[in-house]
Image (cartoon, rainbow, N blue to C red):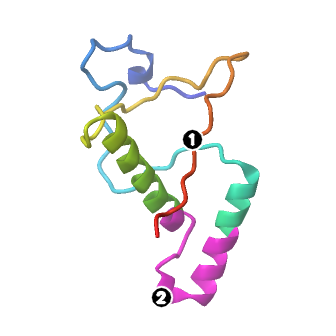
Amino acid sequence: MIQSPDDTAPPPDKGQATGRTPANGRRVQRTVNFDREILDRARAAATYLARNEPSSGIRSLADIVNPAVAERVAELEAKYNDGLPFQPVFRMPPGRRAGQPAPPAPELTAPAD
């Protein structure tokens, strides 16, 4: 793993954002683990829509993922942070430690009619 000098800094005092200040620009590339079935479906949808349905506005996988993540984060902010954005964190701590159980999956609710 390549680390920048900022990645080795001690944890910040409470109330400070962690890691480096994000670079300017609209998009950043990150590695995220997906369930294979969900990723396969999303890639198929993005590919089909980009080729066959230009009016969908979907040109890439990011056009599906970004709005979905934004919607979920807004739900979490509303539920757990009085609708306000959470404190910025520029570098997340590593994933769960070996031997620790995965957190429970969120409950899915059907849309109201």
Q: Could you say whether the residue bearing mark 2 is in a helix, strand or loop?
A: helix
82 or 45, which lies in front? 82
On screen, 55 above or below 97? below
| Circle 2 residue | 55
In the rendered structure, the answer to whether residue 40 lies left or right of residue 68 reads right
- Specify which label sits upstream in the sequence, 1 or 2: 2
Q: Position of residue 94 (x, y in %)?
A: 55, 24
Quarter-of-image position of residue 1: top right
37 or 31, which lies in front? 37
Badge 2: few (under 14), some or many (20 or more) residues near its Cα, within 10 Å? few
Image disc number at residue 106: 1
Q: Could you say whether the residue bearing mark 1 is in a helix, strand or loop?
A: loop
Q: Which residues fall within the magenta stretch?
A: 44-64
On screen, 64 above or below 57? above
Tag 1 and tag 2, C-beta contact below 8 Å: no
- Marks 1 and 2 sit apart, C-alpha to C-alpha, by 32 Å
User: Looking at the picture, which amino acid does disc 1 mark?
Assistant: Pro
Q: Which residue is found at the position 65% from the left and 75% from the top?
A: 47
Asked whether 9 falls inside the magenta stretch, the response is no
76 or 49, which lies in front? 76
In the rendered structure, the answer to whether residue 33 lies left or right of residue 24 reads right
The secondary structure that dominates the magenta segment is: helix
